[in-house]
Amino acid sequence: MKQQFAKRIHLLKPSPTMVLDTIAKKLKQEGLPIINLTAGEPDTDTAEHIKQAAINAIERGYTKYTAPQGTIELRNAVAEKFKHDNNLSYDASQVVIGTGSKQVLYTAFQVLCDEGDEVIIPVPCWRTFIDQVELAGGTPIFVRLEAPFKITADAIEKAITSQTKILLLNSPANPTGAVIDESEFEKIADLAVKHDLWIISDEIYEKLLYEGRHISIASLNDAVKQRTITINGVSKSHAMTGWRIGFAGGPQEVITAMTNLQAQIITTPPSMSQAAALTALTGDQTSIHTMREDLQKRRDMLFEALSQIPQISLQKPEGAFYFFISIEKLLGDTYPTATDWCKALLEKEQVALIPGEAFTYPGYIRLSFAASMDDLQEAVLRIKRFIG
Ligand code: PLP
């Protein structure tokens, strides 16, 4: 019997956070007071009326397969959301619902990316983008951004070759919280049209924006809309990470291909989660505003507190719920890498953070402020004590 796995599976590298995760679990088991600031999800619960919508759906027997593309009610609600929030007109047939925006992204790359195609990815970035491009046979081309991590059309243009097929955008971004400047959006859209590129725009942190207004690149003009897949979901906006509902709007042929592909993987997104997402999008939106205000207070408190530590440097994130902090001055013989530093911080002070290596950006750490004010304040004290 041949024991080898398919080649593509070897493309998946072990996550640098695994080591830290193992230590964190062990320390927790030992009863130590761990402050975990690695979370990629809101720390609030899903709103009661959203939960109730799922309970009602289950009770009325709404427990079967739906259309592979997602229910028409939810696709209409997503089309309405795109219109209302993003000034983007999509018919419900140009919308696909998937099991989380991560899966929707995966199918988008599978549909658009062939062996040898180059995909431009600004870094630091969420590791999933890289793995998904490689799984699709594409070659990630990194555009390295420097603090404050603003994507510019100039930087992107330098990375374009005859092989470039897709440009990945993520604004607000994980792990930096950076937002693309309004003036750059137009230029980036023109670039995509000029060089005949697809744009995959991951806008999952749209609602967690603390400055300015959110811009969907597809809304700028028809030429860019025809080459853009706008991806979003309810995970972060409505504290619904466990429900696994994400969605995309885009040109009809792409959405149909994505639907055909996901039909062979997931069949349909879960019916009761779709019912919950429908209520999330059409019901009372107060929870979004409350969450954003809470997060903003934590961001401001932390920025103030962390800025007083001279050995680190950081910028105020404009969106999402992460600080991406340079600890380069603290690295050397004792802690050669950010991973070593995070490991020691966890063992000595029981604060869990994610090293920049996880985002293709050594020398940095990501701190999630989706945690209680008390935990954040205590974490600052511990980090200060650790740095000395
Ligand atoms: N896109 C980005 C940039 C993310 O950081 C995350 C989650 O951390 C996702 C997408 C995935 O969200 P979902 O829960 O919709 O799959």
Image: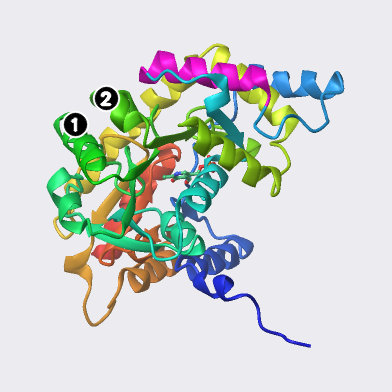
Q: Secondary structure at mark 1?
A: helix
Asked if the stretch drawn in magenta spans residue 78, the answer is yes
Task: Left or right? Give the position of 304 relative to 20.
Answer: left
Q: Are marks 2 and 1 in contact (CB under 8 Å)?
A: yes
Task: Report the quarter where the C terminus lies.
Answer: bottom left
Q: Where is mark 2, residue-wise?
A: 220
Q: CA distance from mark 2 to mark 1?
A: 7 Å
The answer to whether residue 385 is above or below residue 154 is: below
Q: Residue at coordinates 32% horizontally, 51% vertically from top-left?
A: 381
Q: Where is mark 1, residue-wise?
A: 186
Asked if the stretch drawn in magenta spans residue 181, the answer is no
Q: Residues within 10 Å of mark 1 (few under 14, many from 20)?
A: some
Query: Image quadrant of residue 290?
Result: top left
Q: Nearer the viewer, residue 265 or 341?
A: 265
Whichever of labels 2 and 1 marks the residue nearer the N terminus, that label is 1
Q: Residues within 10 Å of mark 2 (few under 14, many from 20)?
A: some
Task: Left or right? Give the position of 311 relative to 369.
Answer: left
* Residue stretch in magenta: 71-87
Task: Report the quarter where the N terminus lies.
Answer: bottom right
Give the percent coordinates (x, y) of residue 55.
77, 23
